[in-house]
């Protein structure tokens, strides 16, 4: 299933590139709106990157179960002997690899563009590595609930954006601490605890949401 979903994702290259292009465009256009001052860019850069990452993940998240729902594959998976939480976890992993990992690979260039220092870059990278899987796990719950709805993407954004505010606060706080040469392990520990909590519960919540959508 992992290989199948990866192959299907790379066949839809236009949809695959949308989150990455949106992420890059938001970050490159932002300095044009606030000015190219290095200190200003350095101050707001981490927050801009995180907001762009959240919006980019939402942009490609609605297709997480969409194709399987429309062609009947999702119903067959629910009726099969394969544990549905495991199916959900595999699909979330594919989403992270195809939609989020390319954003992280672009991060060094964009951090240089926003004048981030080396400690700020490493703190930002650590928060994104820990936080972006959390985006996919929590987002998949809402996707499972809205997969059968027309224009579910708007409802998806309304459901998810308030839930990502705590993650955004701790992530930007970690980068701010790195900018002031202060330890930020506490913020990373909180984000890591949120990720472990989501890994333990989200697959079962996704499975329940998918069953509800099929009824």
Image (spheres, grey):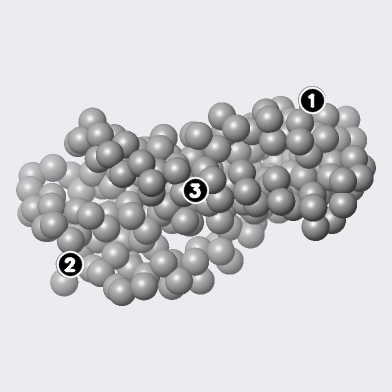
Residue topped by disc 1: 118
Using the rendered image of the protein, determine whether residue 159 is visible from the camera's viewpoint.
no
Left-right relation of 1 to 81: right
Q: How busy is the neighbourhood of tag 3: few (under 14 within 10 Å), some, or many (20 plus)? A: many
Q: Residue at x 18, y 44 (%)?
A: 83
- Disc with the residue nearer the chain's start (2 vs 3): 3
- Disc with the residue nearer the chain's start (1 vs 2): 1
- Disc with the residue nearer the chain's start (3 vs 1): 3
Q: Looking at this view, is 182 or 64 the one in front?
A: 64
Residue topped by disc 3: 19
Percent position of residue 211, x then y: 20, 63
What is the tally of numbered marks visible in this picture? 3
Cα–Cα span, label 3 and label 1? 26 Å
Percent position of residue 14, x then y: 38, 46
Left-right relation of 124 to 102: right
Residue topped by disc 2: 214
Q: Looking at this view, is 22 or 128 the one in front?
A: 22
Left-right relation of 91 to 174: left
Kindly report which numbered mark, 2 or 3, lies closer to the viewer in this rendering.
3
Left-right relation of 135 to 143: right
């Amino acid at each position: 299933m992992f290989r199948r979903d990866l192959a299907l994702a790379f066949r839809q290259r236009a949809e695959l590139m949308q989150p990455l292009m949106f992420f890059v465009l938001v970050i490159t256009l932002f300095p044009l709106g606030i000015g190219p001052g290095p200190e200003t860019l350095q101050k707001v850069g981490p927050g801009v990157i995180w907001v762009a990452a959240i919006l980019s993940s939402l942009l490609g998240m609605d297709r997480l179960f969409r194709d399987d729902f429309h062609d009947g594959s999702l119903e067959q998976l629910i009726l099969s002997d394969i544990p549905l939480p495991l199916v959900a976890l595999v699909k979330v992993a594919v989403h992270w690899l195809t939609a989020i990992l390319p954003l992280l690979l672009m991060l060094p260039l964009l951090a240089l563009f926003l004048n981030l220092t080396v400690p700020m870059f490493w703190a930002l990278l650590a928060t994104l590595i820990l936080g972006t899987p959390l985006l996919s796990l929590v987002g998949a719950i809402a996707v499972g609930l809205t997969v059968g709805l027309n224009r579910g993407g708007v409802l998806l954004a309304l459901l998810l954006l308030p839930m990502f505010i705590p993650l955004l606060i701790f992530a930007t706080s970690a980068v701010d601490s790195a900018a002031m040469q202060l330890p930020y392990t506490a913020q990373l520990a909180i984000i890591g605890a949120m990720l472990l909590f989501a890994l333990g519960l989200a697959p079962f919540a996704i499975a329940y949401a998918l069953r509800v959508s099929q009824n």
